Amino acid sequence: MFRSIALLALSIAMCIAAVAQTADDSIPASTNLPSAQYPRIHPDLRVTFRISAPNAAKVQLVPGGSDNGLGQGPFDMTKDEKGVWSVKIPPAVPGFHYYWFTVDGLPVNDPSTFTYFGWNRESSGIDVPDKTLDFYDVKEVPHGDVRIHPYYSKVTGKWRRAYIYTPADYDRSANTRYPVLYLQHGSGENERGWTSQGRANFILDNLIAAGKAKPMIVVMENGMVAARADAAAMPAASNQPARGNEAFEDVVINDLIPEVDAAFRTKADRANRAIAGLSMGAGQAMQIGLRHLDKFSSIGAFSGVGIRNFDAKTSFDGVFADAAAFNKRVPVFWLGVGSEEPARMTSMKTVVDTMKQAGINATWFEAQGTSHEWQTWRLSLYDFAPRLFRK
Amino acid sequence: MFRSIALLALSIAMCIAAVAQTADDSIPASTNLPSAQYPRIHPDLRVTFRISAPNAAKVQLVPGGSDNGLGQGPFDMTKDEKGVWSVKIPPAVPGFHYYWFTVDGLPVNDPSTFTYFGWNRESSGIDVPDKTLDFYDVKEVPHGDVRIHPYYSKVTGKWRRAYIYTPADYDRSANTRYPVLYLQHGSGENERGWTSQGRANFILDNLIAAGKAKPMIVVMENGMVAARADAAAMPAASNQPARGNEAFEDVVINDLIPEVDAAFRTKADRANRAIAGLSMGAGQAMQIGLRHLDKFSSIGAFSGVGIRNFDAKTSFDGVFADAAAFNKRVPVFWLGVGSEEPARMTSMKTVVDTMKQAGINATWFEAQGTSHEWQTWRLSLYDFAPRLFRK
């Protein structure tokens, strides 16, 4: 009897605790300012956003883009008696998402988050955790640095800067030389993207510590050199790559590679140089990589390919015309996409199928459940990087 | 005759050109996003700000703080027929200034600038050039990197990151060891401040290239570890340093210094270790430096000192009681302030005068024409750094 009552009391206590835990189980996002309590992520991945705007008549939460993992916005927010607007949105897709608010029509950032360069400006961002993945977490493994490295560009006539990841043992092994991956962001982003949003340094730290990827240097520069108008002028049915990126191509070939090979202990040959990028950067990786196979041996295209109608004989100046020669020359030729970006999936698959029919060894990757967002590109890098520099 | 007409025509043409040049002579600020045309700085250092807010009834430009070099705001802005608000403010003081807008009472950043961490959040900022100074320009000299360096803090139980400047020859001289300056930001800022706002890396590049400063490593961490409430609780008439910064002090002594000495080629003795900071960071530099003279030999306090009523016999645990011993032990003991921050000038001078009367060798510096802003601290670093590590 006592035992039953004790058990009952315990049950009630546990039940109360469970309710209390549910009520309190939301956590501030890791992308918030240090003491900012909102946005908060609930255990079911619903997210509550808040902004104080006592004088406003209408406030909305705006996810960055139609394929944003926060869902189809804008979301109307409701005002409390203190003038704080809030909204709790349905469960979000894990990963990093850009967003902002509109306050009576004016786009404003959430003052509670750090800013992340996207959409051609400093934007608010939220990282929704995925409990099933830890490959981009900061773990108790040796860590590399990301160096902000200034250099002068003769092409642009200006000082530029690259973000350059050096692996953890770079400073401990003074005579070791490393292969280099050139890794590009997407349109409207910049050289900070792969570190701040992509967590490329932690992905590489973890892969290298686990022995899954070769220690490598990763060079991340700002690809927004050419006027974007040029890229938009690409004919819809072209079977040649976009030609709007010549300025950035020239920066990479004439300024950046010589700088990196002079300033860092690189293995400065094509076998030890790869290029990859996401979206617009995928097109740049294809264009720059394929036009300079004397400089690069491996290429990765994440959620983009930079060409519409692929022709194995003529596209990219005919570099694929001899498939056997291409396969030997390019040990890693990798294309990937998120399962939730159907238009890009279709267009990229068409290109890849045509390549495969022509006998070209193209590695195809699909990130499950993710869209045209950083989670797809984190997963892409995690699959791509271990394949590099094996020969 | 022909010649006169030709000269007249030339004069007219030059006159038109001059007018046109004056009209066009404003330039986008260097702190703007790459293609943003506003804010624009005029030759007389007046500045025009703009923001599109068609639905707003009242928009103001708000300089960050009452001693901001943009002047005493807020400045009312006026709306054009397209809903673009603008204001042209009187000549600004050269240097970096935080600012934002209020749109119908809501504080919002200028979407046209990069963001700079200040006022406990991402803020807009503008760098107003000083044509008489070039010591913080990016010049054609060898450049060091600023490394984003992750490390684990046992004190906080969390991963942290430091921004660490390594001088240009660090990677070229694999066996050289370097002295280290620990350099702190002010309240509401973070580890990015001395690079983004302060341009410490370029100041050191230029000093080192000119042979004016010893090549050194500069470690910049986030000093906002302790609750600021602790610091505010400091008694107004205390003759002891603020004790609100213990958590950061513990991070520096127990986590950061061991990490830096393990991960970098440092000269790991007190003679080759200095600490300095600005405003709140000046108080931290004084407190941490003076309480750990076994670890630090030189101290710099920029626009702050962290103590109210200095007593040479008892303050800072009596470390100044034997002036001769102190002078021998601390080769660089440096305090500086901007001429346009009169309250701090007075309180710091009182401390320094008391120190000097007690026979303590304190170097005193006044930045001319600048206030409690980054221009004062750039000038402070430029004066302070060359004095370090000479013995």
Image (spheres, coloured by chain):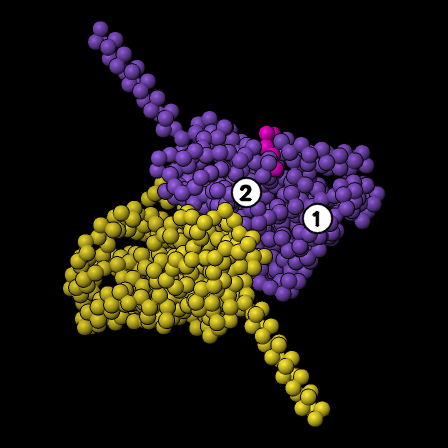
Chain colours: A yellow, B purple
Q: Secondary structure at mark 2?
A: loop
Taking depth in this image into account, of A138 and B308 the one nearest to the observer is B308
Span highlighted in magenta in the image:
B368-372
Residue nearer the viewer, B42 or B177: B42
Local crowd size for mark 2, using a 10 Å CA cut-off: few (<14), some (14–19), many (≥20): many
Left or right of B79? Residue B144 is right
Chain on which label 2 sits:
B
Report x, y in % for residue A7.
Answer: 66, 87
Label located before the other in sequence (1 or 2): 2
Residue at (27, 70) in percent of width and height: A362
Dominant secondary structure (helix, strand or loop) of the stretch shown in magenta: loop
**B387 falls in the magenta region:** no
Q: Which residue is mark 2?
A: B198
Above-or-below relation of A212 to A267: below
Which one is in front, A320 or A357? A357
Q: Which residue, given by chain and number where applicable, does mark 1 sit on?
A: B232
- A387 to A185, vertically: above or below: below
Point out the residue furthest to the left here: A313
Res B147 visible: no
Residue A147 point in image, percent of width and height: 48, 54
Q: Chain of mark 1?
A: B
* Residue at image coords 45%, 46%: B114
| Residue B369 colored in magenta in the image | yes
| Residue at x 53% of width, y 54% of height | A84
B84, above or below B240, in the image: above
Q: Residue furthest bottom?
A: A1
As shown in the figure, which amino acid type bears the numbered disc 1? Ala
- Left or right relative to A258: residue B131: right
Classed neighbour count for the residue bearing mark 1: other residues with Cα under 10 Å, few (<14), some (14–19), many (≥20) = few
Measured as percent of width and height from the top left, residue B297 is found at 70, 47
Does the image show residue B98? yes
